[in-house]
Image (cartoon, helix red, strand yellow):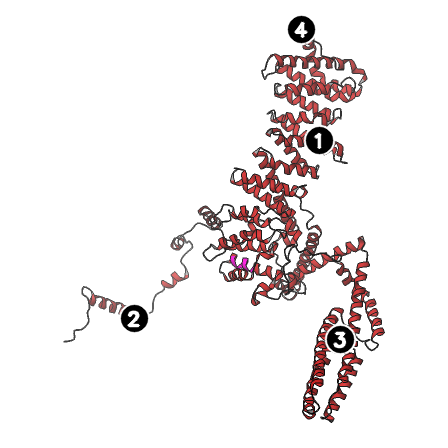
Amino acid sequence: MRQHAPAYTPEAASASATGGAGERHSLPALQAKMKRDPEGYETELRQLQRHFESSVFLFRQQAALSSSSSGGGGGETAKELGDLALFLAHVAPFYPNDLADLPDHIGGLLDTNARALPSGLRVHLVQALILLVNRKIVDLEDTMELFMELQVIGDRAVKKLAFSHIVHSIRRMNQKHKNEAKNRKLQGILFKLVQGEEESRAKRAFTILCDLHRRRVWFDDRTANAICDACFHPSSRLMTAAISLLIGYENVEQEDDSDASSEDEASQNPNIILSKEDVYKANHKGTSASKKKKKAKLERVVRSMKRQQRKSNEESGSNYYSPLTYLKDPQGFAEKLFSRLQKCNERFEVRMMMLKVIARTIGLHHLVLLNFYPYLQRYVQPHQRDVTTLLAAAVQACHEMVPPDAVEPLFKQIVNQFVHDRSRPEAIAVGLNVVREICMRIPLMMNEDLLQDLVLYKKSHEKAVSIAARSLITLFREICPSLLVKKDRGRPIDPTARPKAFGETTIASDVPGAELLDEEMSPEGGSDDESDAFDSDDDEVLPSASGTRQSLESLSNKLDASEDHEDEVSGEQDDAEELDEDDSDDDMDELDDDSDVDGDTDASAEDEDEELNDDSENEDSDQEVEDSDEEDKSKGSGSKVQKRKLSDYIGQLDAADASLRALKKLAGAKKAEASTDEAGRIFGDEDFKRIKELKAKKAAKLALVQHGLSKGDTRSVTFKLPSTDELSLKRVDPSELAAHVKRKMTKEERLEMVKAGREDRGKYQARAAIKQKKTGGSSNKQKQHQKRMPLAAKRAKAARSRQEKKTKAKHSGKQFRGRKAWK
């Protein structure tokens, strides 16, 4: 049971006044003595405890009688009470039984009279309570609501103290291991405040949640969903703060990517461009010392490129984080936020942020929100404010699970409004870039006529427009080259590539990257066993085919061609049989003449058959067929009257059929054996690690080929089509849609550029003024003019001067009209 404080009397007041000053000056010394000898100072502790309880009782009585903000007892008494509270909080761990009620006294005073207390006393009491929590005399769960209440009373110092105490206490609690039970209780208190209707408390709770989430202390699904649910708070300010936080994660992710890309030497110095010319200069131009330096520099750049490429391949997709990733019901979140967007009357910036969050959620979770695209269509105009941000949201909301019919009106609106001959070049460039990004996500949106019209902008004189059109050509060279005209297709890697139909998925039948292990094992002797097995099977089926060493893929293709030719020959055989049965015996002579012609054509057909089957059949069978052909030719040439027998055809066809079936059976057996080996193989951790290393090495080699530092096929590195997961995680930057667009500068910007160009230049002076200020004597040109002329030159000059004067005097004062005709 708590003991009530003794009644306030004048005697107690005088006793506290006489002894209070001495105690107040000796409190730090007494505190040190009590910590060294707790048992020896129990009497002093009880005396100070009674004095503190009396002061608390006095403050409560005066707060009930008067509502003045000065509190009870004046400033001196308030400072004395604050010092006593701090003193007792410091010695509380040494007297756990005697000071068990101290947290109740301090917490009760703050809970009931926090607004009425003086600012200094309020700060001291909060510090004392924080000290008790840090000493684990009081649990944070019991004081959590009080500290949240102290943040909204209007005292900045107290608000800062309470906020930092909550954050640091929870961080310290989860530093070594996470206590899920305590975390859930504290999260429940903050979640309840965030969902409450009172704006001030909800905002403070939301700030704490965001700070702990940013510091990765509460980095779980519950906190992420609570932050996302704050977007639906009735308060507009809290909703704006939550949406700004979600968008801020996207901006932080982009800044992290730019910082990470600038770590190595090659990316730190943007002037380093690895080209074939640099490699040639490093190896062939300059002295031996300069070439040595160039080679060393190139080696450093190559090492940094390899390291950066491996790092990007290892960490691709793993650094991205956003609370939107851990939504429990992303479809409900997007629909609810979109419904609020349609009804709200917020300012344009807030609605644009809501639009970006909705589009990001749709793209991240591959949602289907069909009403979102007609809503965007109303604002797709070149003169719309922040139109690039709007178009970036439209691109972000497109993915392969969206029906093309739902996005087609928006797609046509973008093309019709931005890409036409009367549009501005910057609008055309933005429109082409948006079309490229949408087609990268939904290739079925593009048709052949529209693509060929858009591709014609590659001849534009505007750099931004031509670059955008060429990027569209590059994309469709990979996705669907058949939509391009022949001159724009170039040399695609897969000429028969087609975009997947709507709803079509690709199911992996093997482990991705397993072929890299096979390629690595093949030069070490892994392919010898296969070749031996191939030889043994060959010997069993066809003893004379021991020299055949062709790949199974080419073998199967040639088998198909041989089967087609076999069908043609069998058709000719049936025609010959029908012809033989229908003809009569009376026309034998004519039949003999025709048979000679038929024999020649059949022989030529057999020759073609032999040429087609040379690669697939063995040498012995070829020899037999050739011998039979020679016999047929000799028979046909020896006796023209004798008719060729169908048995000869049947024998040849049986031999060819036997060899073709044998080879086809062999190819099927080898394929089945390979498939069973791959299906029966179990990959371990070492295999997966090796696959990861081989992928990184392959990517590094492709980077070297792309920069001209290694030999290889450059078609495979010109453009790498990102996967669906990479597109969903990648944030569409509005500035990239307007890349290479020259923005018209304002007058102030032009003046700044002019002034910047004049900084390193001196004050302008005329050339004559510079000559006049010259000191040190005359120049050589002036001295040349001062030289005396020769006598002949003087006479010539005087004669020329007299002639000029005479001519001038003759024509002065009258206009010369020429000589008259009648004189």
Query: Circle 1 sits on which residue?
Result: 186
Q: Residue at x 68, y 41 (%)?
A: 328
* Category of crowding for the residue at label 2, using alpha-carbon neighbours closer than 10 angstroms: few (below 14), some (14–19), many (at least 20): few
CB contact under 8 Å: marks 4 and 1: no
Q: Is residue 608 left or right of residue 407?
A: right
Q: Which residue is mark 2?
A: 796
What whole-number distance in Å separates the C-alpha atoms at marks 3 and 2? 104 Å
Q: Amino acid at mark 3?
A: Ser
Residue beneath label 4, please? 10
Contact flag, marks 2 and 1 (Cβ < 8 Å): no
Q: Above or below — where is 692 with respect to 190?
A: below
Say which label, 2 or 1, has the lower sequence index: 1
Q: Assess whether residue 469 is covered by the magenta stretch.
A: yes
Q: Quadrant of residue 532?
A: bottom right
| CA gap, disc 3 and disc 4 | 121 Å
> N-terminal of the two: label 3 or label 2?
3
Q: Position of residue 749 (x, y in %)?
A: 47, 47
- Can residue 550 be seen in the rendering of this structure? yes
Foreground of the two, 806 or 307: 307
Relative to 681, is 67 on the left or the right? left
Q: Mark 1 and mark 3: span between their CA atoms?
A: 77 Å
Q: Quick check: 448 above or below 315?
A: below
- Asked which secondary structure carries label 2, the reply is helix
Q: In the image, is residue 209 above or below residue 478? A: above
- The amino acid type, in three-letter code, at marker 4 is Pro
**Which comes sooner in the sequence, label 4 or label 1?**
4
Q: Which residue is painted at 74% across and 35% down in the image?
A: 174
Residue at image point 80% right, 16% down:
40
Give 449 or 588, whichever is nearer the viewer. Answer: 588
> Which callout, 1 or 3, points to the residue nearer the camera?
3
> Local crowd at mark 4 within 10 Å, few (<14), some, or many (≥20)?
few
Q: Which residue is mark 3?
A: 616
